[in-house]
Image (tube, grey):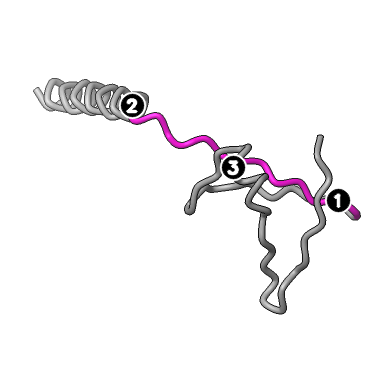
């Protein structure tokens, strides 16, 4: 674990030191979760969404919708 000191700006912003950003592979736009208790702040990077998983979710949703619509057509017979 590494120790660094950062300063909070008047706008509530802080700068993550370059060496830390480089080591963690942080890029502009990286999303992070901020967890707090009464005395501690923890930043955790959020993984980028997996596009393949999103595609599978869309495909499955379409199948469910198709089955639901199919059931409606048979119910009105």
- Part of the protein shown in magenta: 39-51
Q: Which mark is residue 40?
A: 1
Q: Position of residue 7 (x, y in %)?
A: 77, 66
Vertical comparison of 2 with 74: above or below:
below
Spatial CA distance of label 3 from label 2 is 33 Å
Q: Residue at the right extreme?
A: 39
Pointer 3 residue: 22
The residue wearing badge 2 is: 57
Q: Quadrant of the C terminus?
A: top left
Q: Nearer the viewer, mark 1 or mark 2?
A: 1
Q: Nearer the viewer, residue 34 or 56?
A: 34
Does residue 43 show up magenta in the picture?
A: yes
Which residue lies at the image location 67% right of the left edge and 45% below the top edge? 20
- The 10 Å Cα crowd at callout 1, few under 14, some 14 to 19, many 20 or more, is few
**Residue at 82 percent of width and 57 percent of height:** 5
Q: Give residue 4's position: percent from left, percent from top.
A: 80, 51
Residue 36 at x, y percent in the picture: 79, 51
């Amino acid at each position: 674990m590494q120790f660094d000191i950062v300063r909070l700006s008047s706008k509530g912003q802080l700068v993550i030191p370059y060496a830390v950003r480089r080591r963690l592979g942080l890029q502009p736009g990286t999303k992070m979760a901020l967890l707090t208790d009464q005395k501690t702040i923890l930043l955790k990077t959020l993984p980028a969404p997996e596009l393949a998983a999103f595609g599978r979710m869309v495909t499955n949703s379409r199948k469910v919708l198709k089955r639901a619509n199919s059931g409606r057509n048979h119910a009105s017979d």
